[in-house]
Image (tube, helix red, strand yellow):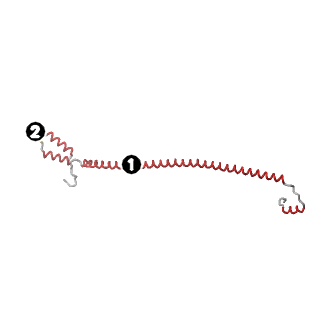
Amino acid sequence: MLEDEPEKVPDSTALLEQLRDILEAARKLPMSASVSINRDEFGTILQDAIDGLPEELREARWLLKERDQVVERAAHEAERLVDAARVRAERMVEKNELVREAKRTSEEILEDAERRAAAIRHEAEDYVDRKLAAFEVVLDRTMQTVQKGRERLQVHAPSPVVNEADADEAGFFDQDDL
């Protein structure tokens, strides 16, 4: 055999068929269901069949084992991602709920403030109206008093008699005549 040539792996299927043929051609022992076969020949062929199992079968077993590990890791990773997504979604829902609650609370506060402001405005207007009414009454009384005082002055006031000497002096100081 040359070193450059790859080692020929016996065909496992052909070897297994050869073993089947040996069993079928084996001599039956008298008064028994057993057969007589050459143990060394059968063992050698069986070992060659085992050795001849394609490397792919061993790789397939390894790949199956590896696949199971990958699937398990992927399942754990998927579970972790789902949990993380669930937590994030819950936080987002909480934030949305908090925002909604804050918005609702702020609207209630604004409505309450507007009601209070309107009530205070009405109270202030009523207060100012009462004060103005009281001031109006006072002014009205004052006006009536002033009017009565003027009327009294006009009824009791004597007509002025002025002599000429007093008239010159009166004219000097009387600014109403200007």
Residue at image point 81% right, 52% down:
152
Say which mark, if any, is on residue 29: 2
Tell which circle, 1 or 2, labels the residue nearer the N-terminal end: 2
The amino acid type of the residue labelled 1 equals Asp
Number of numbered markers: 2
Rendered view: 168 above or below 98 = below
Please identify the residue farthest to the top as the structure is shown. Answer: 31
Relative to 132, 107 lies left or right:
left
Relative to 171, 134 lies left or right:
left
Q: Mark 1 to mark 2: distance in Å?
A: 69 Å
Residue 145: % across, % down: 76, 52
Occupied quadrant, residue 171:
bottom right
Residue 85: % across, % down: 41, 49
The secondary element bearing badge 2 is classed as: loop
Relative to 160, 90 lies left or right:
left
Relative to 145, 27 lies left or right:
left
Tell me the quadrant of the picture where the C terminus can be found. Answer: bottom right
Residue at image point 45% right, 48% down:
94
Residue 2: % across, % down: 20, 54
Q: Residues within 10 Å of mark 2 (few under 14, many from 20)?
A: few
Residue at image point 21% right, 55% down:
3
Q: Nearer the viewer, residue 15 or 87?
A: 87
Say which mark, if any, is on residue 104: none
Residue 75: % across, % down: 34, 48
Please identify the residue farthest to the left as the structure is shown. Answer: 30
Q: Residues within 10 Å of mark 1 (few under 14, many from 20)?
A: few
The amino acid type of the residue labelled 2 equals Leu
Which residue position is annotated with label 1? Answer: 83
Residue at image point 41% right, 49% down:
87
Q: Nearer the viewer, residue 128 or 113?
A: 128
Please identify the residue farthest to the front as the structure is shown. Answer: 156
